[in-house]
Image: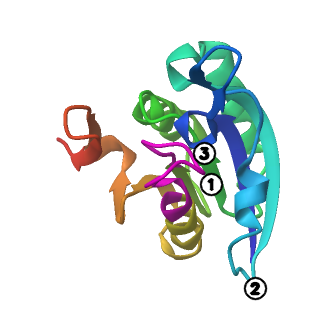
Amino acid sequence: MKIHLLTTGGTIEKIYSEQTGQVENLIAKIDRYLQQLRLPDSQIEITPLMNKDSLQMTDQDREQILKAVRTRIAVAPVVITHGTDTMVETGRQLKRHLGTLEYPVVLTGAMTPLGFERSDGLQNLTEALFAARTLPPGVWIVIHGQNFDVEHVRKDRENARFVFAD
């Protein structure tokens, strides 16, 4: 099965910069981690859109994501890696503008970058790829073993997790 994977940055792709002493979005690295997974009957097509912290995303960035999803969603599910701080906002914008879907659109990210000790990134990416194959059409957030309809979720910053919301 074909799955489109759009990368936008966020914590999942952050690395430690020795020059600045900070964790930053500098290079895309999702493809290296996909190679660690056994996906024998999946064709993952990766498209890097940007490499930004989601708090730095603009309306133009979200429009770019929407446009990329529109050109791909008619033929296969789409998974989007995204920063967790504004993931719900982007998901809701996608849901408002995409109309009726034939496949699911799944957003995922991480609280700790890929490659860092106790990172949740690879788990979340794996779950999102599975969810893209099994969830019904719609816009979803898949993270930490749960899936949420984008209209009924919020980030609980205090506990570093997503929870159901009205």
Q: Residues within 10 Å of mark 2 (few under 14, many from 20)?
A: few
Q: Is residue 98 magenta?
A: no
**Marks 3 and 2: in contact by CB < 8 Å?**
no
Relative to 51, 133 lies left or right: left
- The span picked out in magenta is 108-124
- Indicate the amino acid at tag 2: Asp
Give the x, y percent position of residue 87.
46, 35
Quarter of the picture containing the N terminus is: bottom right
Q: Earlier in the sequence, mark 2 or mark 3?
A: 2
Relative side of 87 to 160, left or right? right
Residue 58 is left or right of residue 4, and the answer is left
Q: Which residue is drawn at 56% across and 38% down?
A: 82
Q: Label 1 vs label 3: CA separation?
A: 7 Å
Query: Which residue extends farthest bottom?
Result: 40
Viewer-side label of 1, 3:
3
| Labelled disc at residue 41 | 2
